[in-house]
């Protein structure tokens, strides 16, 4: 039931998890299976990854190859259900939800101390650089 609920969730609630974060979360949990309701992505910044048993909805090609090369295994949810029907010896993980591009635009851009990213057509001299941004162009907020 715990794993069934996230399977029906929207894409926003199924964020991807990188191999580096997965390795960090699974330190000292060698005998357990990592369960991620989402995609496992590769992280080129991590040179060595430990032996992992991972169950996820999807794996990128390179992430799957690196897990298998390290002596680990990539499972599907069907295989996990046969392996441990009660969910014993599993660790349920999730990627960061707030790292989407859309999250950067939430809030009101142009207001002082607001770090919201405005939706701008281009990032040139003529686009949202003038009035309200600099004293030399009328006023500064």
Image (cartoon, rainbow, N blue to C red):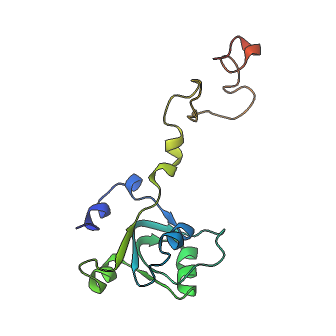
How many numbered markers are drawn?
A: 0
Q: Residue sitting at 29 percent across and 68 percent down?
A: 3
Q: Quadrant of the N terminus?
A: bottom left
Instruction: Say whether residue 92 is left or right of residue 127.
Output: left
Residue 67 percent coordinates (x, y): 53, 81
Foreground residue among 57 and 25: 25
Looking at the image, the residue that sits furthest to the top is 138
Residue 94 percent coordinates (x, y): 42, 62
Q: Residue sitting at 46 percent across and 60 percent down?
A: 95
Looking at the image, the residue that sits furthest to the front is 28
Q: Residue sitting at 58 percent across and 36 percent down?
A: 117
Foreground residue among 124 and 7: 7
Q: Quadrant of the C terminus?
A: top right
- Image: 79 above or below 135: below
Residue 89 picture quarter: bottom left
Instruction: Say whether residue 89 is left or right of residue 133.
Output: left
Residue 137 picture quarter: top right
- Image: 137 above or below 29: above
Q: Residue sitting at 56 percent across and 28 percent down?
A: 109
Residue 59 percent coordinates (x, y): 48, 72
- Image: 8 above or below 42: above
Instruction: Say whether residue 54 is left or right of residue 88.
Output: right
């Amino acid at each position: 039931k715990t794993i069934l609920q996230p399977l029906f969730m929207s894409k926003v609630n199924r964020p991807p998890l990188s191999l580096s974060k997965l390795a960090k979360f699974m330190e000292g949990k060698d005998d357990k299976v990592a369960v991620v309701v989402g995609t496992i992505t590769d992280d080129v910044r991590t040179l060595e990854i430990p032996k992992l048993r991972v169950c996820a909805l999807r794996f990128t090609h390179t992430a799957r190859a690196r897990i298998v090369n390290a002596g680990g295994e990539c499972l599907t949810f069907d295989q996990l259900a046969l392996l441990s029907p009660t969910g014993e010896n599993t660790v349920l993980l999730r990627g960061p939800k707030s790292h989407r591009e859309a999250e950067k635009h939430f809030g009101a851009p142009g207001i002082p101390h607001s770090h919201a990213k405005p939706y701008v057509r281009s990032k040139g001299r003529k686009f949202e650089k003038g009035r309200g941004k600099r004293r030399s162009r009328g006023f500064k907020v």
